[in-house]
Image (tube, rainbow, N blue to C red):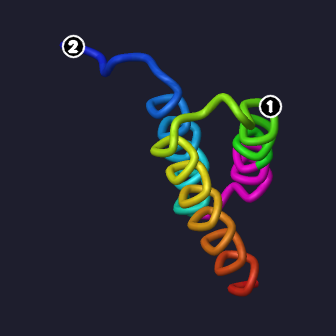
């Protein structure tokens, strides 16, 4: 089995997938999802000015989607 090339895009996607998996668990693991969202936010800040345009768009999109999903899980209380 061949693993995907390790780069910033793959790293962002991996963290995002972990956060989404936590949100979709039964019951949702909101603490772990928040941890992964916070991790992506930290990476967004720490890599500012060092990302390609594609990486910039990707991390922005991933964070938006994860935040919206997190809010939806919160509203289901």
Residues in magenta, as a range? 27-37
36 is within the stretch colored magenta: yes
Badge 1: how crowded within 10 Å, few (<14), some, or many (20+)? few
Residue 51 vs residue 55: left or right? right
Residue at 58%, 49% in the rendered image = 59
Give the residue pinned by disc 2: 2
**Horizontal and vertical percent position of residue 73:** 67, 75
Q: Residue furthest left?
A: 1
Q: Which residue is mark 1?
A: 46
Q: Is residue 77 left or right of residue 18?
A: right
Q: Quadrant of the N terminus?
A: top left
Residue placed at 52% from the left, 36% from the top? 52
In percent of width and height, residue 38 lies at 79, 46
Judged from the image, the secondary structure of the residue bearing numbered disc 2 is: loop
Residue drawn at point x = 21 percent, y = 13 percent: 2
Image location of residue 35, percent across then percent down: 78, 44
Front-lying residue, 69 or 31: 69
What residue is shown at x 51% (from left), y 44% (from top)? 53
Q: Is residue 60 above or below residue 35?
A: below
**Residue 65 included in the magenta stretch of the image:** no
């Amino acid at each position: 089995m061949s693993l995907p090339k390790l780069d910033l895009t793959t790293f962002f996607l991996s963290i995002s997938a972990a956060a989404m998996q936590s949100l979709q668990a039964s019951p949702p693991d909101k603490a772990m999802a928040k941890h992964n969202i916070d991790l992506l936010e930290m990476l967004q800040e720490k890599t500012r000015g060092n990302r390609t345009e594609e990486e910039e768009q990707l991390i922005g999109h991933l964070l938006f989607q994860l935040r919206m999903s997190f809010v939806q899980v919160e509203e289901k209380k």
